[in-house]
Amino acid sequence: MPEVIYGETKEIEQIVLMTRKLLDETGRTIISRVPTEAIEVLRDVFNTYNVRVHGTARAVVIYKPDYVHRRTGGQVGVISAGTSDVPVAQEAALIAEEMGCEVTCIYDVGVAGLHRLLEPLRNLLTKEVDAIIVAAGMDGALPSVVAGLVPVPVIGLPTSIGYGMGGKGIAALLSMLQTCAPGLSVVNIDNGVGAGITAAMIANRVARARSQQSQ
Amino acid sequence: MPEVIYGETKEIEQIVLMTRKLLDETGRTIISRVPTEAIEVLRDVFNTYNVRVHGTARAVVIYKPDYVHRRTGGQVGVISAGTSDVPVAQEAALIAEEMGCEVTCIYDVGVAGLHRLLEPLRNLLTKEVDAIIVAAGMDGALPSVVAGLVPVPVIGLPTSIGYGMGGKGIAALLSMLQTCAPGLSVVNIDNGVGAGITAAMIANRVARARSQQSQ
Amino acid sequence: MPEVIYGETKEIEQIVLMTRKLLDETGRTIISRVPTEAIEVLRDVFNTYNVRVHGTARAVVIYKPDYVHRRTGGQVGVISAGTSDVPVAQEAALIAEEMGCEVTCIYDVGVAGLHRLLEPLRNLLTKEVDAIIVAAGMDGALPSVVAGLVPVPVIGLPTSIGYGMGGKGIAALLSMLQTCAPGLSVVNIDNGVGAGITAAMIANRVARARSQQSQ
Amino acid sequence: MPEVIYGETKEIEQIVLMTRKLLDETGRTIISRVPTEAIEVLRDVFNTYNVRVHGTARAVVIYKPDYVHRRTGGQVGVISAGTSDVPVAQEAALIAEEMGCEVTCIYDVGVAGLHRLLEPLRNLLTKEVDAIIVAAGMDGALPSVVAGLVPVPVIGLPTSIGYGMGGKGIAALLSMLQTCAPGLSVVNIDNGVGAGITAAMIANRVARARSQQSQ
Amino acid sequence: MPEVIYGETKEIEQIVLMTRKLLDETGRTIISRVPTEAIEVLRDVFNTYNVRVHGTARAVVIYKPDYVHRRTGGQVGVISAGTSDVPVAQEAALIAEEMGCEVTCIYDVGVAGLHRLLEPLRNLLTKEVDAIIVAAGMDGALPSVVAGLVPVPVIGLPTSIGYGMGGKGIAALLSMLQTCAPGLSVVNIDNGVGAGITAAMIANRVARARSQQSQ
Amino acid sequence: MPEVIYGETKEIEQIVLMTRKLLDETGRTIISRVPTEAIEVLRDVFNTYNVRVHGTARAVVIYKPDYVHRRTGGQVGVISAGTSDVPVAQEAALIAEEMGCEVTCIYDVGVAGLHRLLEPLRNLLTKEVDAIIVAAGMDGALPSVVAGLVPVPVIGLPTSIGYGMGGKGIAALLSMLQTCAPGLSVVNIDNGVGAGITAAMIANRVARARSQQSQ
Amino acid sequence: MPEVIYGETKEIEQIVLMTRKLLDETGRTIISRVPTEAIEVLRDVFNTYNVRVHGTARAVVIYKPDYVHRRTGGQVGVISAGTSDVPVAQEAALIAEEMGCEVTCIYDVGVAGLHRLLEPLRNLLTKEVDAIIVAAGMDGALPSVVAGLVPVPVIGLPTSIGYGMGGKGIAALLSMLQTCAPGLSVVNIDNGVGAGITAAMIANRVARARSQQSQ
Amino acid sequence: MPEVIYGETKEIEQIVLMTRKLLDETGRTIISRVPTEAIEVLRDVFNTYNVRVHGTARAVVIYKPDYVHRRTGGQVGVISAGTSDVPVAQEAALIAEEMGCEVTCIYDVGVAGLHRLLEPLRNLLTKEVDAIIVAAGMDGALPSVVAGLVPVPVIGLPTSIGYGMGGKGIAALLSMLQTCAPGLSVVNIDNGVGAGITAAMIANRVARARSQQSQ
């Protein structure tokens, strides 16, 4: 499991320090919610490393030159309800990928237009994903709808999109907790990292079971 | 618009008093949330009147013998997400009917099984309903889904079904307030009377417009 | 029903992209909560289009040169309690107008001075409005007062005006949800777009009924 | 100022003990929220005293046989929005009376029917009341309306009437705290005793000023 | 009663417009929470008027040259718990003064050092104040302590001082609402204007009673 | 996935009706939160069926005589923090078993005595469980501790144990949502059924992968 | 440190079982919040033991016949604000005594009558208490007042006394958390056991230091 | 006990004024949460004094040149869960040191890696600390874990680290209030000063007892 540095509340020096320590230990460092002003510093400091900036996901991943990406065969699906939910969804997707999974994303398929959901959902199932992350803010209805349609564990990922009463993701989280659909568990608002790790852990266990047996 | 006596927090004597006063003034009295022990009292006291007990809706309507039911031609749809939401949905339906509307009900079509929703929804639209009440507790997702599918004003009616965080209808109400779907307004948790009045007011205005013009 | 771009949480490029797409599809794009710095960009990018900036409502509407405004005959009333509620009220009015309604506005008639309310309310009724939007922050009492005085569906539109306990529109929203007045349903705090769509949907249904019959 | 025993959370023996102590010290004891089963006990134990039971206000006042009621000349008005608010309003009225004030009550004049309010309010002003208590649950709008109409200090007394979101008096209290009307201060939900004491303190100060000067 | 312009959420032009209107009508305008950048504008625009800036209270009062200050003889006390509560306390004091009262202020006498409170409180009583405003943030305990010590109506004025759980004045307000002391009513957090008006209304009624009788 | 009847809010007749329907369709019915008075009724009505009452879990499962239990090979662990958390933990365990999993339970290993946790946790890992449910009320710290110690997906199951601020499971749920440990997702308070289904879905997917490959 | 059985949420059999286990291990068992119906059962089952029932504290302590009470010399003070706070205060006192401390109690000295507090507080200090527990519901102001007056660690013990907004101890707890007084830490609402343990741990450390040195 | 100036909500001039006053009275001034821009001012104004800036703790302490640091012999432990909790933990440590205690700090030992905790905790106990402050944000689980492992009074210090539901320290505080571990009391979120004072008061009492006896 990757240790992820949560950049938002940290000083740049702290980030650099922790990044170097993790690089030494594991050959790779993932930093989420990177402050914009830290990106150039990281590029400079780690200019002999492989620095990948994931703009939408607000994340940076740095690899040692000899870092080898391992594929686990785990299959994860990521669905997001609205365009504003995409950054959090991308963060989750990135984490799952860094944990070796193949990730299939479906964006912008909110409950207000269910017809747009059914087709891509069917495609997802044919890929045999073993866990689906559904990111949604506002009414947070999408994860319940998805969990009602597919026999796959769904991780509800509420996003801080929404205003007024129940805003900032509160309504979305509460609605997911109150779901009537089976197989839906949740993580906290905007916790893309947590959703990604949980989904990848599930998918990787299945993938490992498959491959172990096939040997 | 009918004045409705909210029975739950009133003494039986108060209910009887207010019932008699309204009967004298309007020829009909609607009492919602009637305490069980009040029903027999009402039957006794008003035994020369027409007393109708609506068990599921927990309501009693009493009419003067010569009360004439007027039909307005208003068409209202009522949808409920789960079996536990039916009493509140029935209360709303009863009120709309007492306001002269024809009411079409669809029960038990939660988000966890969307396929059960589409067919009856299509039937509803062919009836040309002018307002749809959607009662839902728990995740409260159904009103958003319905409002996303039909071009009719939807009144979200959260019910106090649900437990834990966001329970007692809180998550349902918040999710409806945060809806992304157009044309959805809400009333308070378990406010079947309010939903019924609003829907009937809308439907009756349309019906009146139709009939006025046709004369 | 118009699809409205919520500008507040979007990047300018996203707004431009979505605007162009909607213009192509429907000939008109409405953007609410437009970030100030986006307005000039929109004027530049769409300089061959008809760009209307609604300052108070913080909205921009862009039309294809050949866009034809259709009038539905729907009549909507918009009332706001205080001067600080006007922007949200205007947003609602704008949406209803873009949906073809004629909108009559009454501003600055709070509960603390009820005498200022009665006269313009009477004028509103003579216009035969079919839905009234009442925007109020602070104590949120005005929608209840209006709904108690007129036999027209009222959409309560709480605004984020207010401070301390129950501030940011919370007290206003809760007070509207707890209303004793008949025919009042609500939308979320500052949701002028939602209130406008709901009111226009109601008014347009009535108007259509009128005109269909008259043919 | 009378010390009032809050009966609701006390054992009967505790109530009897405290009652006796206060009777000895002051010649009178007021017990609010008296548990039903305590009333007969109080009648029995203090059968040589003057025991007055105020059913609606859920209060008991016990006087020594030689207790002399003093009138201060203070004038207090008490208004309640709905029938369910009457018990709390009565509690407030009782306390003000026991503090020597003359109390004028207006019941059942909610915001949903403002026309019923204006006439009795005018009568109240001709009585020259120096403080007005306005009890209201649900939307809690009435105190704001009253404070906007009269130049007299208003004490908002929210009652625990209301259900769903903002229920149990929460919306009423918050709406009063957010009032736009001048001269409105509030006490906690159902705190009839507190409202009564505050109103009587104000009225008695004015009355004393009047009488002191007239000597 | 003075109409007060709440400056915080208004545009400078709006403030200027409303100021001029009120000046014309009443000869004086009070603006609370004046944005710093508005002060110079007000000085410029109304340079033929008497412009008084109350820095700590964040208020500006503008008078017509011929405006006559009337003294009512009303006596109001203002107490503040900590140095951070002083601005809100000053706002309340200013309003009471503008309503003609004489105001006596005691600052920085929190519950954590009760010995500092008793002496000045005694002085206050010898002044025969008819209403005391007690401003307190944090634990909000001071108003209860004061109301327990003096037989004068106390207006609890919670301030938005405080952090963490119950911060921003929430704990202070709740503690005041839960007071065991008699004669304490409250206004919303930071509502210095409301507290000032209520206190002055009370004090002025007493003063008027005194003077009317003495004639 | 089994459809589970939530007995708590249903009438006995409703339960019987739904039970019979599910028995006909699937040969088995699981009823959670069975009201005590319903148990004997169920035994009577379904006396030709196999009725198993799970006292601690407050659940009843009824099977057709010819119902065949299928074992999936899925391995699930269930841990509970305190004795009061056991009923909810048992409910989760029961559901996982009915979905074909083998369930290993560890009870009474709260954070206040971590030494009691480590040994049984090690045993759990040697069983190769693929999902662990951790039920905890009060501080809700145990799921975070467990997720920090094992590389297995953990489903946090807050229970409604706890009092005062953060009571009824609120603190437990929030603490789990705020976890720093990787691989922890949560369900709502007391949602043993949801936790059981999610864990079993994960374990069964892994088990199926194992067996499919081994063929 | 004594392990305390929280009786409120446990079955009688569970209590008996846990009681026996603890008696065997430590010679003494403390059961808090004992359900009334459990007391006789405990007396019966443990009739050869020394069973002490503490009625007000709602606790039972059972000792082996040969149990030796050890005095530590620790000195703890317990203060309660109102009569309704006494049970929780007594619970705290009992626990501290069972941990070997001498406990001095002061009851019924709320903030609304500070003069009653000063004298007994002075007596407490002459006893050289090393920790003071202050139990208070409602406004929760007393702990702050005490901590401001004495240089001894104070443990704030909010009780669930209070109604309306901030009721059930919420306002009391929040006010204590927001205290301006030094040396005040808090436990949860009604957690007399926790307050007692903390106070006794502090007092016992000081006592041990004293005695160790004197040897 | 040191009086501490809370710098965050004060003007620089106020800080300077209060600093000078305290320096005159006690020879030392501690300012917490010093605004960055105030530091240079303080250095300038008090350039003949000994000014120590504690960057991480965001505090400044200023001493008269002849100020004598007294050591009490009190031993305090400070533990922080994550790197983001260190500033608040340092603030607490600083206060305890300024009160004469020796403070031992353990940083970055969260629940997600319990193995890192046990060793340093053992070292802490060998130092014979008499009070331990445990700072934690997010899930707030560490104080419960520590209090379950050591027989020393623990002061839970929640920090405002955390996001989404239960964020800003809310979940941490609630989880600590709900602890099952004995001897844990809490202060408000980010209240390092309060935690430091409480811990030092306890430790100093023990130290004084030791030394008094040894004389």
Image: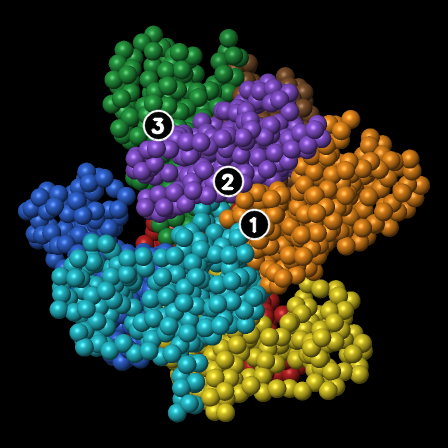
Chain colours: A blue, B yellow, C cyan, D orange, E purple, F red, G brown, H green
Q: Quadrant of residue C94?
A: bottom left
Tag nearer the camera, 1 or 3: 1
- Cα separation, mark 1 vs mark 3, equals 38 Å
**Residue at (60, 44) in percent of width and height:** D151
Q: Nearer the viewer, residue H82 or F199?
A: H82
Picture layout, residue A45 above or below residue B100: above
- How many residues crowd around disc 1 within 10 Å: few (fewer than 14), some, or many (20 or more)? many
The residue drawn where x is 57% and y is 43% is D183
The dot on residue D148 is 1
Tell me if residue A191 can be seen.
yes
Q: Position of residue G51 (x, y in %)?
A: 73, 41
Locate residue H15, reporting x and y percent: 36, 23
User: Could you tell me which residue is drawn at 20 percent across and 65 percent down?
Assistant: C51
- Residue sitting nearer the eye, B134 or C182: C182
* Tag 3 residue: H11
Instruction: Name the disc covering residue E2, or none.
Output: 2
Along the line of sight, the residue nearer the viewer: B117 or H117: B117
Give the CA separation, mark 3 to mark 2: 31 Å
In the image, taking residue G80 as reference, residue C9 lies left or right, namely left
**Residue H151 in the image: above or below residue C56:** above
Tags 3 and 2 both on a single chain: no
Residue shown at the point (36%, 46%) measured from the top left: E17
Q: Under tag 1, what secondary structure?
A: helix
Indicate the position of residue E190 as horizontal and vertical percent values.
Answer: 47, 39
The answer to whether residue F24 is left or right of residue E44 is: right
